[in-house]
Image (spheres, rainbow, N blue to C red):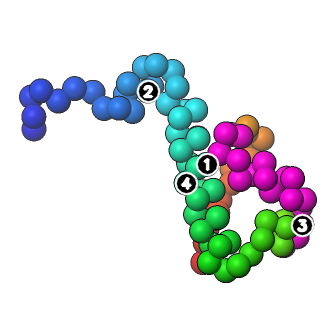
Amino acid sequence: MNKYTGSSFDDFLEESGVLEDVSAKAHKRLLTLQLEDIMQKDNITKSRLAGKLHTSRSQLNRILDPENTATVGKQLNISFA
């Protein structure tokens, strides 16, 4: 173990009080990138995906917006097959 190693970046973010927000944005961005890759590979438009999800395209845009990390008190589980 390196005796000169300090705290982790997560520790720094936690001490700064932004770990939860930064983590939420990172997870949201990763989800968005993965979903956009799948949509492009399978030639699925946002309108078509919104229809399959029984929602509007504007709602889908909010879901895919990495800056929109508002919570609604629910846990979201997503898997790509």
Q: Secondary structure beneath disc 1?
A: helix
* Towards the viewer: 22 or 48: 48
**Residue 14 locus on image (x, y percent):** 45, 25
Amino acid type, residue under disc 3 in the picture: His
Q: Which residue is mark 2?
A: 13
Taking the view exactly as shown, the residue that stands out farthest to the top is 16
* Towards the viewer: 65 or 11: 65
The answer to the question of whether label 1 and label 4 lie on touching residues, with beta carbons closer than 8 A, is yes
Span colored in magenta: 51-69
Residue occupying image coordinates x 62% and y 78%: 41
Amino acid type, residue under disc 4 in the picture: Leu
Q: Which residue is mark 4?
A: 30
Q: Nearer the viewer, mark 4 or mark 2?
A: 4
* Left or right side of 31 for 2: left
For marks 2 and 3 on the same chain, the one whose residue lies earlier in the sequence: 2
Classify residue 57 by image quadrant.
bottom right
* Residue 11: assigned label: none
Q: Is residue 53 visible?
A: no
Q: Secondary structure beneath disc 4?
A: helix
Q: Is residue 3 visible?
A: yes
* Towards the viewer: 43 or 22: 43
Q: Secondary structure beneath disc 3?
A: loop
C-alpha distance separating marks 1 and 3: 21 Å
Residue occupying image coordinates x 52% and y 26%: 18
Examine the structure image and report whether residue 19 is included in the region drawn in magenta: no
